[in-house]
Image (tube, rainbow, N blue to C red):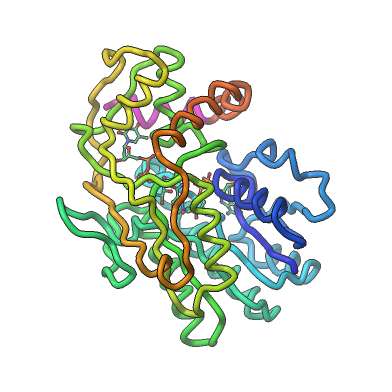
C-alpha cells in the first residue's frame, strides 16, 4: 500500500510519517516544498528506510504534482501541506490562498486523474470560528472562519466537499484542535513560550490571556488520522480533539512552573486581530464510529514536550536562524 503524504516535513506530518512507517508494511511518499516550517531533520530516523521516498515539490504547482503522481501512483493521499500559522496569515494572506486552496485543488485534480482510493484532508477546528463560554463544535457547526488562515482551510474543505459530491471521489475530512508535542515550529504558543522562558526572554501573551484552546498531543491526532484513513465513512467529516480546554495564561504559567522560572517574564501584549475566544471540540462521532479517543494525559504530555525542547536545543537553533528572526520582529515589534 502506498500513501502520499503532503507537508510531511512539518510538525504533524513528520510525526505522522514516523508513526505510519513504524507500524505498517506500507510505503510513504512525502511531498513537501520545505518552507520555513518544513525540516528534513524531523525525518532523519526514516530517511534511509526503503519504505520512504521524498520529493521536494510545491502543491500549488499542478504539473509537478501530476508528475509525482505519474511516477509514484499512490493509492491514498493525506494532505497536511499548508501554511499553518494564524499570525503569518494576518501579515501575508496571499500564500495561504495559494497553498491551502489552490494546492488542495491541484492534489484533488491529480487524485481524480490517477484514480486514487481515498483522499484525507487534514483540516482544523478553526474553520468553525469562535465559541462563547459554553457549547462545542460538532461536525454540523456552520463554517465561520475568522482569520485568513482558517478561511483558506475552510475553502479547502469546501473544494474537497465539491469533488466528493461532483466527481464521487472517496474523500474524508478531519478537523482537529490545537496540537502540541515534539518538532512543533517555535512560532506556536507552546514551543515559543518554552524557548523564551528557557532564554529568560519575555513571554508575549495576547490580550488578557483568557482565550481558550483545546490541546491534544500530536500522537493522539496522528492515531485519529490513521483510523479515519482506514475506517472513516466516505464523504464524512470527523472532529478530533483532546477534551482538554485551557486558557493561554494557564498554559504559560504551567510552562514557567515546569522550568522553574518566574512569572515576571510574562508580558501582556496587544491582542491578535480577530482573535478567536474559545475552541472546544465534540468528538463523539469519531469515538462512537471508530473507537478513537485521546490517550496522552496533558500534564505529563506537556512535561515531556518541555523536556524534548530542552534536549533538542540544536534543532530549535536551526529553526530560529535566518528568516524566523525577521518574522518575529515584524509580528511582535508593535505589540
Ligand atoms: P507546519 O507548518 O508545521 O507544517 C506544514 C508543512 O507543509 C511544512 O513541512 C511545509 O514545508 C509544508 N508546505 C507548506 N506549503 C507547502 C506547499 N505549497 N507545497 C508543499 N508543502 C508545503 O504545520 P502543522 O502544524 O504540522 O500542520 C499540518 C496540517 O495540519 C495543516 O494542514 C494544518 O492546517 C493542520 N492542522 C494543524 C493543527 C495544529 O495544531 N498544528 C491542528 C489542526 C490541523
Ligand atoms: O485549533 C487548531 C489550530 O491551532 C491549527 O489549525 C493551527 O494550524 C495552529 O497554529 C493552532 O492555531 P492557534 O492560533 O490556536 O495557535 P497558536 O499557537 O498560534 O496560538 C494559541 C493561542 O495562544 C492563541 O489564543 C493565541 C495565543 N498566543 C499565541 C502566540 C504565538 C499568544 O498569546 N502569544 C503568542 O505569542
Q: Main secondary structure of the magenta part?
A: helix
Residue 60 shown in magenta: no
Displayed quadrant of residue 209: top left
Q: Position of residue 280 (x, y in %)?
A: 28, 54
Q: Position of residue 187 (x, y in %)?
A: 45, 34
Q: Residue at x 70, y 42 (%)?
A: 43
Q: Nearer the viewer, residue 104 or 199?
A: 199
Side (left or right) of 59 relative to 285: right
Quarter of the rendering occupied by the C terminus: top left
Residue 329 shown in magenta: yes
Quarter of the rendering occupied by the N terminus: bottom right
Q: Nearer the viewer, residue 313 or 270?
A: 313
Q: Quadrant of ligand 2?
A: top left
Span shown in magenta: 324-335
Which residue of the protein is positioned furthest toward the left in this rendering? Answer: 133
From this view, report whether residue 187 is shown above or below residue 131.
Answer: above
Displayed quadrant of residue 248: top left
Q: Residue at x 34, y 17 (%)?
A: 202
From this view, report whether residue 222 is shown above or below residue 307.
Answer: below
Q: Position of residue 146 (x, y in %)?
A: 28, 55
Q: Nearer the viewer, residue 65 or 203?
A: 203
From this view, report whether residue 190 is shown above or below residue 152.
Answer: above
Amino acid at each position: 500500500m502506498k500513501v502520499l503524504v503532503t507537508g510531511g516535513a512539518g510538525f504533524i506530518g513528520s510525526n505522522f510519517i514516523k508513526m505510519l512507517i513504524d507500524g505498517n508494511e506500507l510505503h510513504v511518499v512525502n511531498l513537501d516544498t520545505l518552507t520555513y516550517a518544513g525540516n528534513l531533520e524531523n525525518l532523519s530516523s526514516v530517511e534511509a528506510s526503503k519504505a520512504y521516498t521524498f520529493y521536494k515539490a510545491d502543491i500549488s504547482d499542478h504539473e509537478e504534482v501530476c508528475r509525482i503522481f505519474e511516477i509514484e501512483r499512490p493509492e491514498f493521499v493525506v494532505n497536511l501541506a499548508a501554511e499553518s500559522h494564524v499570525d503569518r496569515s494576518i501579515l501575508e494572506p496571499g500564500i495561504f490562498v495559494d497553498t491551502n486552496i489552490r494546492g488542495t485543488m491541484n492534489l484533488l485534480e491529480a487524485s481524480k486523474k490517477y484514480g486514487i482510493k481515498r483522499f484525507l484532508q487534514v483540516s482544523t477546528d478553526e474553520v468553525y470560528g469562535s465559541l462563547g463560554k459554553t457549547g462545542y463544535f460538532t461536525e454540523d457547526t456552520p463554517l465561520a472562519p475568522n482569520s485568513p488562515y482558517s478561511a483558506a482551510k475552510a475553502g479547502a474543505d469546501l473544494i474537497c466537499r465539491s469533488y466528493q459530491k461532483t466527481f464521487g471521489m472517496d474523500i474524508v475530512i478531519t478537523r482537529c484542535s490545537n496540537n502540541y508535542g515534539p518538532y512543533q515550529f517555535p512560532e506556536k504558543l507552546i514551543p515559543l513560550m518554552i524557548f523564551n522562558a528557557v532564554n529568560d526572554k519575555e513571554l508575549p501573551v495576547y490580550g488578557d490571556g483568557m482565550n481558550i484552546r483545546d490541546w491534544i498531543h500530536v500522537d493522539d491526532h496522528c492515531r485519529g488520522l490513521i483510523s479515519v484513513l482506514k475506517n472513516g465513512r466516505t464523504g464524512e467529516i470527523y472532529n478530533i480533539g483532546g477534551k482538554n480546554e485551557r486558557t493561554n495564561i494557564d498554559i504559560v504559567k504551567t510552562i514557567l512552573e515546569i522550568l522553574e522560572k518566574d512569572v515576571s517574564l510574562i508580558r501582556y501584549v496587544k491582542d491578535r486581530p480577530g482573535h478567536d475566544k474559545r475552541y472546544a471540540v465534540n468528538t463523539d462521532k469519531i469515538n462512537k464510529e471508530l473507537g478513537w479517543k485521546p490517550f496522552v494525559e496533558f500534564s505529563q504530555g506537556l512535561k515531556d514536550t518541555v523536556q524534548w525542547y530542552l534536549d533538542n536545543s540544536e534543532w530549535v537553533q536551526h529553526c530560529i536562524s535566518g528568516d524566523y528572526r525577521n518574522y518575529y520582529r515584524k509580528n511582535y515589534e508593535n505589540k
